[in-house]
Amino acid sequence: GRIGVAVVNVEMTQAEKGEPENGKEKEREQRGVKRPIVPALVPEPLQEQIQSNFIVVIHSGSTTLRIGRATDTLPLNIPHIIARRHKYPGQPIYRDRWLLRDGLNKPESNEQRQNGLKMVDQAIWSKKMSNGARRIPVSPEQARIYNKQMRPAVLDHSSGVKWTSTSHHPEYLVGEEAVYVNPSDCYNIHTPIRRGQLNLHPGPGGSLTAVLADLETIWSHVIQKYLEIPLKDLKYYRCILLIPDIYNRQHVKEVVNMILTKMGFSGIVVHQESVCATFGSGLSSACIVDIGDQKTSVCCVEDGVSHRNSRLCLAYGGSDVTRCFYWLMQRAGFPYRECQLSNILDSLLLQHLKETFAHLDQDISGLKDHEFQIRCPDAPALLYQLRLGDEKLQAPMALFYPATFGIVGQKMTSLQHRSQGCSEDPHDEHYLLATQSKQDQSSKGTADRKGVSKPGGYEGDMRGQSSDTSDRLHSQDVEIGSSQNECLVPGHESEDPPAALMCRKTAVSHFEGKALGLDKAILHSIDCCASDDTKKKMYSSILVVGGGLMFHKAQEFLQHRILNKMPPSFRRVVENVEVITRPKDMDPRLIAWKGGTVLACLDTTQELWIYQREWQRFGVRMLRERAAFVW
């Protein structure tokens, strides 16, 4: 065991000195043999700084990749996108969608949108302003007449923005350069992650192999170009990878394999975003509400453990609010009429308008005049005037009334489903369950905090575990038994007749087809905690991370909704319901990444490292052995 760690540190210090690599093969060989599956050793404090400098923390979101050394104060934020040159010119160009998604053009979509908006308007009207008066609603017609006659003013004959130069025919372009590829160039555009999962689809570049290749190319490019680490030196580096709480086991296994065997990092720690968010914010326990661009995940974390039963993933996020804002602005006569949701640059503009104008402040009412600029490559810089009213408040409120997004026939809520077992891991959770005595199982259930909540109303009883949101290729059916103390619909033992199992499956799929509003999802997640004590802890510490709720007055708005909707029994005993949106005044988008850097220097992390040699020898079993969560 000792040799293992010594070697890692020797490699690191040698890398620092830039010494040639000699006689290390033998030592590495020893490491592979000496350390079958044993915890690693805690390093000397003096090596801590050297070590953190040789650790890369990767948090790969659907639209943004956050990556940096564990010693960096802030990560790099790179658009998580790649443009790949066509092998055969003349083929149709493939582009992953940015703001558009399936389920928006169904016959019921518009009706659903209108119904959602009615609920939003009702909620706006029913909550008084701080001076006690009711808000006076503003109809879109009032702004439309003004906006319809607006024409842009030319600020400058050149926008100062250029398309990415492709005259040297690069094979691929990454990040910002991929965003600004001229649509007439022969490049396919891929976003390897969608709604927090690998973006597998039947189109070009949608296979598991292609998506993993895209991740490897993007990450390697960024590590070389921006972190200035030559790829051949990655053998001196280790990686901390943040994954969603509701993860697909096969995908995580493939990404870990790509990092260790293809990219060549010497070791890896995999941890969940929510737990990292608690580390990053300095809270020991919290209900984590992570609102990303495409998905929102909620779960309760207590002392570094994410409660499996409390995990929920909602298939909507910031991009849906942006699209909703565009729809509302169009009703009010949006003056930039060439705008298209299928265009990446227009999507970025709309996102910017949402971030600039939208808010959750009941006291801001009436019509107001705004202006915005458009700077597109090969075009003049334009200035538009725009008059808006309630649209700025209605759009963010769609997060609480997701029918307003108009998404029909999609799976909108995921729970953590049971593992299907893995051929490479004969001692997986199924084997362990089968060989444990009933007694052990119940105590393990408590230890892992997978406790069953008391039988109660329908909403509070959806327990279980999911591994993917939209993954046709590896879809895992909900597998429910109470062998793990997971109750879905109360009062059933595992010896259920098939009919009862079917009825439970229907209950789950019914639940998963519905889009829960953000406040309901938070209440549901907290209600899934095992003890009243834990629930109280969660109500007094609701941490909002990610970039999807960074609206003016969002904190007060969410706090008010939770207070109003929480069960009366808790309202009496929880001293203060607290929603935290900017812990220590940090950017909420960076908190999980920051937590990854904290993880890098915790003593306890030393026993979580999975080294390349071990991975090659034991494969996915290492994740079950070393992961800090129940794999």
Image: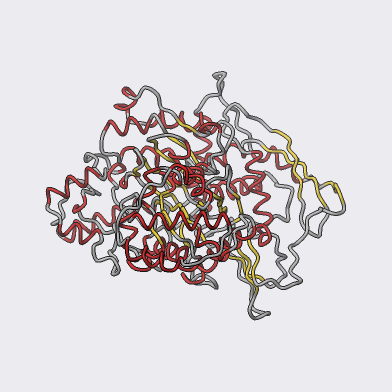
Query: Is residue 468 toward the left or the right of residue 337 in the image?
Result: left
Q: Say whether residue 115 is visible.
A: no
Camera-side residue of 564 and 622? 622
**Whole-percent x, y for residue 223 in the image:** 59, 58
User: Quarter-wise, where is residue 517 in the image?
Assistant: top left
What residue is rendered at 34% in x and 31% in y? Answer: 537
**Whole-percent x, y for residue 542 in the image:** 42, 34
| 514 vs 431: above or below | above
Total marks drawn?
0
Quadrant in which the C terminus appears = bottom left
Of all residues, the one furthest to the front in this rendering is 23
Camera-side residue of 216 and 348? 216
**Whole-percent x, y for residue 449 in the image:** 26, 43
Q: How is the image coloured?
A: secondary structure
Of all residues, the one furthest to the right in this rendering is 157
Camera-side residue of 396 and 179? 179
Camera-side residue of 299 and 125? 299
Quadrant in which the N terminus appears = bottom left
What residue is rendered at 49% in x and 29% in y? Answer: 126
Q: Say whether residue 332 is visible.
A: yes
**Whole-percent x, y for residue 323 in the image:** 59, 50
| 161 vs 452: above or below | below
What residue is rendered at 75% in x and 46% in y? Answer: 148
Query: Is residue 186 toward the left or the right of residue 552 in the image?
Result: right
Query: Is residue 437 toward the left or the right of residue 466 in the image?
Result: left
